[in-house]
Image (tube, rainbow, N blue to C red):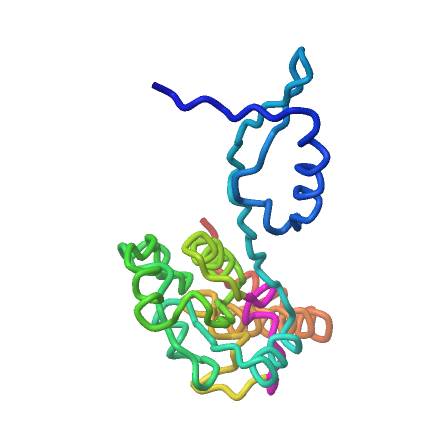
Amino acid sequence: MAEKSPILSLSHLKVLMRVVETIQPAHILGTSSLVLEIHRGGTVTTRPIRRRNLGIKAEVNYVNAEEAKKLIAVEGYAILDVRDNTQYNRAHIKECTIINRQLHNNFSGLFYGLPFTKPNPDFVRSIKSQFSPESKLLLVCQEGLRSAGAATKLEEAGFQNIACITSGLQSVKPGTFDSVGSTELQDAGKAGLVQVQGKISAVVGTVLICALIFITLFPEQAEKILQMAPTS
């Protein structure tokens, strides 16, 4: 049988209210408390209720490059690079840890230097093996998208001190961080056709300008050359 709630007379009400007033709100939150119900006849019954624990959710701190530099130097944030190995090898910040957010899936996109990828199923597990949930982590990637997604995953896993560089390493000016690699941090994402298209455009542009100058200065010779060209 269910246990009956105790019955209090009105003479005890003032004493009970004084006790309730001495309880701090911080002690009430997340614990059971009392509901007082006044019935006919002047009796008061107490009914315990349960309140759900109110968890405090951490927010990801999005910073620019200069603010990120202060987080590392002043607050002791560890750098977690979530890019692929190719971009990491081209350029990365000194004393950082690399854990890939994405894994290579196939060869699609290689012409643009960004291979088609899939999420790393061991991403969170790998981080937990090296860092505690209380660790201060600065997540970096090339454009800011992978680090933002990684921050969400870590936040869900219980990490409380997460920061990301807005727009990623592509927004970092040369010399901001001590880096290792064959190129600047902001250029580490350029590869494939994207890497050489600037040089190709420069060559084509130079040829066109030279042709225009030649036609302008030597119109008769240019006309003869055009007449010599085979027609379909």
Relative height, residue 190 to residue 55 (above, below): below
Q: Is 139 in front, or is 23?
A: 23
Residue 173: x %, y % from top left: 63, 79
Taking the magenta stretch, the answer to whether it contains residue 231 is no
Residue 220 location, quadrant: bottom right
**Residue at the farthest front position:** 11
* Quarter of the N terminus within the rendering: top left
18 sits left or right of 107 in the view: right
Question: In the rendering, at what x and y percent does residue 129 appear?
Answer: 30, 69
Residue at 46 percent of width and 68 percent of height: 134
**Looking at the image, is 131 positioned above or below residue 29?**
below
Name of the residue lying farthest toward the top = 40
Q: Residue at x 48, y 56 (%)?
A: 155
Residue 167: say if magenta: yes
Residue at horizontal 51%, vertical 58%? 148
Q: Residue at x 66, y 37 (%)?
A: 16
Q: Is residue 40 left or right of residue 98?
A: right
Q: Quadrant of residue 7?
A: top right
- Viewed as shown, does residue 208 lie left or right of 17? left
**Magenta stretch bounds:** 163-176
Residue 124 on image: x %, y %: 35, 60
In this view, the residue in front, 82 or 180, is 82
Residue 231 locus on image (x, y percent): 48, 52
Query: Which of 34/52 is in front?
Result: 34
Foreground of the two, 143 or 110: 143
In this figure, what is the number of numbered marks?
A: 0
Reply above or below: 185 against 163.
Answer: below
